[in-house]
Image: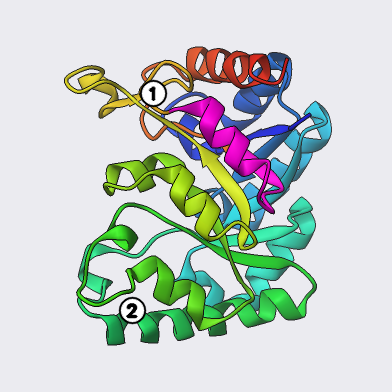
Amino acid sequence: MREFSYQLYSSRNFGPLPDTLAMLAEAGYSMVEGYGALFADDDSVDMIREALDTTGLRMPTAHFGIDMLTGTPDRALAVARKLGVEAVFAPYLAAEDRPSDAAGWAAFGKRLAEAGKPVVDAGLRFGWHNHDFEFQDIGGDDLPIDLIAQASPDIMLELDLAWVAVGGHDPVDWIGKYSDRILSAHIKDIAPKGENADEDGWADVGHGTMDWPAIFSALDRSSAAYFVIEHDNPSDDRRFATRSLATVNALQE
């Protein structure tokens, strides 16, 4: 049986974090995934630790910006240790910082590997979380995601399946290609074209266009250890959290 986590970014526009964690525990989640803005200062981290202890939730994975990983690696590791994080994922590259050719992406891969070295040396896992831009054609045989993966075997992947689809690719194909490099998967759904405009075109898991039976079958043949439910802009995070968990649990019955 897969155990599902919840990316807390999905609830950033709603109530205080302790209330969100209580809601998620009540809904049946056992894990959550943190993200950089939650770790702004030590008081915030202390509050998260207390709320995790109160609800019994764990935070085995978290997103840390590459600037934090390179600029203040000791603090990033201290936060990870305090919260029980096992795997750190760098999540994003701003548009103005994205390379435009293969050489640039190869150089970024090396930069990412260097950013992850203190994490790996500390005994944690490290990886990259994709969006759609890593799947854009830049000429040649390799896409940016390939060049990132080629930079170091220590760079694992947190494959955001919906962003792969938005990038014009079949997630099942990419799960197969990198089956031994996928450490985590973001379980996210896409609304049918023209629907859910108020939610930026995303959908509750199982209520969109993603082929979850095929995707989970492929994930079962991969090295994925974490399965993180996410929605980039839900209008109701409780609805999203509960309906999505019900869907993925039903697929295991």
Residue 71: in sight, yes or no? no
Q: Look at the image and tell me in which quarter the N terminus lies.
A: top right
Tell me the amino acid under the disc marked 1.
Answer: Pro
Element type at mark 2:
helix
Q: Viewer-proximal residue, 41 or 136?
A: 136
| The quarter of the displayed image where residue 234 is located | top left
Residue 73's place in the image compared with 176, above or below, is below
Instruction: Locate residue 18, reporting x and y percent.
Output: 65, 29
* Neighbourhood count class around disc 1 (C-alpha, 10 Å): few under 14, some 14–19, many 20 upward: many
Instruction: Locate residue 127, reporting x and y percent.
Output: 58, 65
Residue 190: in sight, yes or no? yes
Query: Which dot marks residue 197?
Result: none
Report the magenta residues as a range: 211-227
* Neighbourhood count class around disc 2 (C-alpha, 10 Å): few under 14, some 14–19, many 20 upward: many
Q: Viewer-proximal residue, 152 or 180?
A: 180
Q: Look at the image and tell me in which quarter the C terminus lies.
A: top right
Q: For the residues carrying marks 2 and 1, which lies nearer the camera in this image?
A: 2
Residue corresponding to mark 1: 234
Query: Which residue is located at x 29 percent, y 42 percent?
Result: 166
Distance (Cα) linking label 2 and label 1:
32 Å
Element type at mark 1:
loop
Residue corresponding to mark 2: 105
Residue 243's place in the image compared with 51, above or below, is above
Query: Which residue is located at x 60 percent, y 76 percent?
Result: 116
Q: Viewer-proximal residue, 146 or 45?
A: 146
First-in-chain label (2 vs 1): 2
Instruction: Locate residue 113, reporting x and y percent.
Output: 54, 81
Q: Is residue 99 magenta?
A: no
Tell me the amino acid under the disc marked 2.
Answer: Trp
Instruction: Locate residue 242, reporting x and y percent.
Output: 58, 14
